[in-house]
């Protein structure tokens, strides 16, 4: 993927990794459109970075995705990249007396069905471009499950598999598929405490490394920052097991990173 001269749509662009990527691509002169449910958050980004465009989207709603795709196609006919970044991560207690599946269902709708539906809706437009890219943001937990977020880990593993299959099916077209695999990053995905957790990779450092990898490895299938390598290749290293608590995950990560 070339990191300049694009028209890029980023879901979940109002905060966290989505906002960081939006700002980075905007600085390189790309036309950036950020989408999400919280209009106020989107407008805050656009006001801080004139030229970034906004559009509301609920990735859990198939009808809203259809509406959104039609609007984006009309307003941005040169769209040639979509970053499926919107996601939620919630703790689940599956040894409770009664398990409420609402969290699992919301996670699947947001993290997996959302990217699949949006990609399907935008693919006809992407295929009109000389070159186009679908970038799916997964997680190191796609490769090493965290036990208290089982559905989140499952959706990211599924999105990894979907990305592989989609890349294969589109290999004869002008549409490439890239997977961005974050480690534990200082965002508010799991709450405000995560944004300042010293065990998490600073967001600015993550974004800088991602952009460097995209610049220097334009044909990469997976964008893997150094901090995520122990998770991504845990199976190859012979590491097995589940991390049972978020703090334990941090401790284990430090040990794995030192390997």
Image (tube, rainbow, N blue to C red):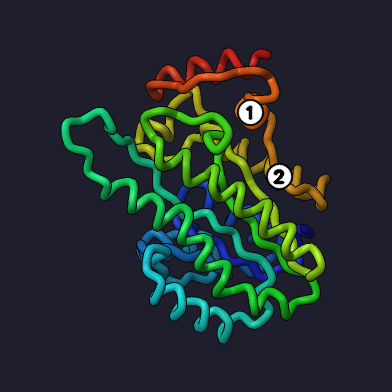
Q: What is the quadrant of residue 169 in the picture?
A: bottom right
Alpha carbon separation for disc pair 1 and 2: 14 Å
Q: Identify which residue, 239 or 11, lies in the foreground.
A: 239
Q: Is residue 7 above or below residue 183?
A: below
Q: Position of residue 140 (x, y in %)?
A: 57, 35
Q: Position of residue 48 (x, y in %)?
A: 50, 59
Relative horizontal placement of residue 127, taking residue 117 as reference (left or right) = right
Q: Where does label 2 land, which residue?
A: 222
Q: Identify which residue, 167 or 110, lies in the foreground.
A: 167
What residue is rendered at 48% in x and 23% in y? 198
What residue is rendered at 68% in x and 13% in y? 259
**SS state under label 1:** helix
What residue is rendered at 62% in x and 36% in y? 205
Q: Position of residue 80 (x, y in %)?
A: 69, 71
Q: What is the quadrant of residue 109 in the picture?
A: bottom left
The circle on residue 227 is 1
Q: Is residue 65 above or below residue 207?
A: below
Relative horizontal placement of residue 17, taking residue 246 as reference (left or right) = right
The quarter of the image holding the N terminus is: bottom right
Q: Is residue 14 above or below residue 101?
A: below
Q: Earlier in the sequence, mark 1 or mark 2?
A: 2
| Residue 52 in view | no
């Amino acid at each position: 993927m070339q990191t300049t001269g694009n028209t890029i749509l980023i879901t979940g662009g109002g905060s966290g990794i989505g906002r960081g990527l939006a700002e980075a691509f905007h600085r390189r002169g790309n036309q950036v459109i950020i989408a999400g449910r919280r209009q106020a958050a989107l407008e805050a980004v656009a006001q801080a970075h004139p030229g970034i465009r906004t559009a509301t989207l609920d990735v859990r709603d198939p009808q809203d995705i259809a509406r959104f795709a039609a609007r984006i196609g009309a307003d941005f006919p040169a769209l040639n990249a979509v970053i499926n970044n919107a996601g939620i991560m919630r703790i689940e207690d599956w040894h409770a007396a009664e398990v409420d599946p609402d969290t699992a269902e919301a996670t699947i709708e947001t993290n997996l069905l959302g990217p699949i539906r949006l990609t399907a809706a935008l693919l006809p437009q992407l295929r009109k471009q000389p070159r186009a890219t679908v970038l799916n943001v997964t997680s190191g937990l796609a490769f090493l499950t965290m036990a208290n977020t089982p559905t989140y880990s499952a959706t990211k593993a599924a999105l990894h598999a979907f990305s592989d299959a989609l890349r294969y099916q589109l290999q004869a077209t002008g549409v490439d598929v890239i997977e961005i695999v974050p480690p534990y990053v200082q965002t508010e995905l799991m709450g405000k405490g995560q944004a300042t957790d010293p065990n998490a990779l600073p967001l600015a450092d993550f974004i800088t490394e991602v952009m460097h990898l995209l610049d220097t490895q334009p044909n990469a299938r997976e964008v893997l920052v150094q901090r995520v390598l122990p998770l991504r290749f845990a199976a190859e290293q012979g590491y097995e097991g589940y991390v049972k608590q978020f703090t334990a995950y941090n401790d284990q990560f430090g040990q794995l990173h030192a390997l």
